[in-house]
Amino acid sequence: MEQLDLSDLFTTRAEANIFLARIAAISEMFFKTDFNLEKALVEQFGVNKGDRFLAILRENNINVSSTPAVKNFFQTLSQKISSMPVIALTVAFEPQEQTLKAISEWFVINMQQQMLFDINVDRKLVAGASVTYNGKFFDFSIRQTFERIIQNYLTRHAEAHAVVQQVAKTNQQANQNATIGTK
């Protein structure tokens, strides 16, 4: 279980916490006489995620009919999830699940580990994202570029307005001088 990609099940810290709570709920049912792991997984996660979780158990050679083996796997899995690195990701829009999954897969492929995202939405970013990880902040948004473009436009507009005002003033003085010279 060294390299385990659970991005099919969760991508954010909030989703991981819900996942852990559901694992704990299933763990509490283990020693009930009528316990059925597949039924418990479907009840807690739904059909698709329940099936994916069963596949993960099988991929890790966990005998699903062995309660101690499943319980041990759940404990190990809970520890791994609790220790996953978290990236604070601020974006200008509410990301869809597909977007988060694509970002998560990028980290699994390029960094060889799953990251959890702590998502914040800040529409002032305009586009792009800002990232905080291990106490370091990276701004990949276009806010500063956009603000610089707007400031340049306003400055040029103000300068052009000043030139127009100056030309108008000069023309007015020239008209006044021409009117005085014809009298």
Image (tube, rainbow, N blue to C red):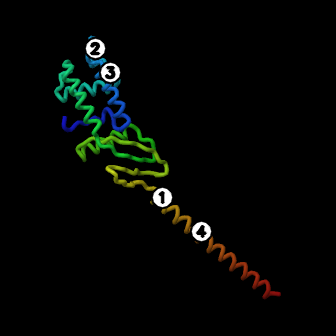
Q: Earlier in the sequence, mark 3 or mark 1?
A: 3
Q: Earlier in the sequence, mark 1 or mark 4?
A: 1
Amino acid type assigned to the residue bearing label 3 in the image: Val
Q: Closer to the N terminus: mark 3 or mark 2?
A: 2
Q: Quadrant of residue 165?
A: bottom right
* Percent coordinates x, y for residue 166 in the rendering: 65, 76
Q: How far from the left and from the top, in percent, is residue 15?
A: 36, 34
Tag of residue 158: 4
At label 3, counting other C-alpha atoms closer than 10 Å, the crowd grade (few under 14, some 14-19, many 20 or more) is: some
Q: Check disc 4 and report its element: helix, strand or loop.
A: helix
Q: Quadrant of residue 25?
A: top left
Q: CA distance from mark 3 to mark 2?
A: 17 Å
Q: CA distance from mark 1 to mark 4?
A: 18 Å
Where residue 146 is drawn, which disc sits there?
Answer: 1
The residue indicated by pointer 3 is 42
Q: Secondary structure at mark 2?
A: loop
The answer to the question of whether label 1 and label 2 lie on touching residues, with beta carbons closer than 8 A, is: no
Q: Is residue 178 left or right of residue 75?
A: right
Q: Amino acid at mark 1?
A: Phe
Q: Which image quarter holds the N terminus?
A: top left
Can you name the residue that lies furthest to the top here? 33
Specify which label sits upstream in the sequence, 4 or 3: 3
In three-dimensional space, the C-alpha distance between marks 3 and 1, rounded to whole angstroms, equals 47 Å
- What element does badge 3 sit on? helix
Q: Is residue 139 above or below residue 68?
A: below
